Image (cartoon, helix red, strand yellow):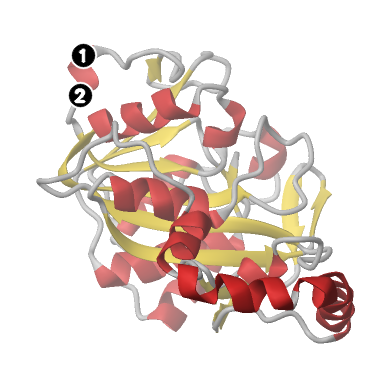
Amino acid sequence: MGIPRGSARLLLEEGKRRPFSGALLQLGRSSVYFTGRDLERWARRHGFALRPGVAETRSHDPRLAAQGCLDDRTFFARLGFDQVRASDISPWEGADHLFDLNQSIPAELAGRFDVVFETGTIVQIFHLPNVLANLHRLLKPGGRIIHCAVPSNNHMDLGFYMLSPTFFSDYYAANGYRIEAHYLCEYFAYWHQGRLHSDRWRVYEYHPGCLDALSYGRYGGPQAAIFLVATRTAESTCGAIPQLGQYRRMWRQHVSRDDEGARAAGHLLWPAKRVVESIRRRLLPRPMPKLVARY
């Protein structure tokens, strides 16, 4: 998986909010799709102080190294981390820790990391409840999980799943995590010489319910991915099973028994109203949440 321009700039913003330090664990080695000069330019725009004195190493992918792209360990060290490690199920990219996230993590890794970082790896692992529980166990209390560019709309067969933003907001809320940032990012991506390029990312501020009007066929063609930061608090757990937020909102707003008769009276008009509403929604602009950045 990889870190393109939009992901890097969101990470700079998160590092400004709460500086990075300590130990980071990546799920898989991250391919970095930009150069050290690019990173320095973006850091100046964001007012982010990169760590000085870090020796620059080129990417572990020879195709990206030939284009001057950074190594993942260099990138995270420049963000401020003292220790950068990677886990994987296979040794083929040089991960430091080898284990299967479908199963329990090695006991010696429990509570070792200040940040667990993943950029779409989660959708390539079949047993999602086990994965989420393992991420919780890897974190120190007060540590952060960062889900970066997790595939959502229009990522067919990239993994087992395309996840909706509500998956993360419902799970972390149910388990007592503090959600620090939650964005939906849109872009049109293309590949050239093994390097991911895209148009300028459109970053939308996500909150539960903001996409309800787009649930049935209205979202459209752009690729979309999720960026979320959640902090493990003293009350955080990993075993609470969430209920889908859309239905929890419906339960809170259910029609009372006194209104049942009024609703039944309009029942014959319901199919026509549904058709008109469907046409109206398709003709009007998409009601997207607040656009907060273009990266």
Q: Position of residue 101 (x, y in %)?
A: 43, 20
Question: Which quarter of the rendered picture does the N terminus lie within?
Answer: top right
Quadrant of the image occupied by residue 264: bottom right
Specify the amino acid type for callout 2.
Ala
Quadrant location of residue 153?
bottom right
- Checking the image for residue 110, the label placed there is 2
Instruction: Give the total of numbered labels.
Output: 2
| Residue under pointer 1 | 107
Looking at the image, residue 182 sits to the left or right of residue 281; the answer is left
Seen in the image, is 210 located left or right of residue 53?
A: right
Residue 28 place in picture, x, y as percent = 50, 30
Image quadrant of residue 201? bottom right
Q: Left of 31 or right of it: where is 129?
A: left
Q: Is residue 236 visible?
A: yes
Q: What amino acid is at disc 1?
A: Ala
Question: What percent of the width, then of the height, locates residue 33?
Answer: 63, 52
Q: Please determine whether, in this image, residue 244 is positioned above or below residue 107.
A: below
Disc 2 crowd rating (10 Å Cα; few below 14, some 14-19, many 20+) is: some
- Separation (CA) of disc 2 from disc 1: 6 Å
Question: For the view shown, which residue lies furthest in the bottom direction?
Answer: 284
Q: Nearer the viewer, residue 223 or 236?
A: 236
Q: Are marks 2 and 1 in contact (CB under 8 Å)?
A: yes
Residue located 46% across and 64% down the image: 249
Which corner quadrant holds the C terminus? bottom right
Q: Residue at left 34%, top 57%?
A: 79
Q: As rendered, which of 229 and 258 lies closer to the eye?
A: 258
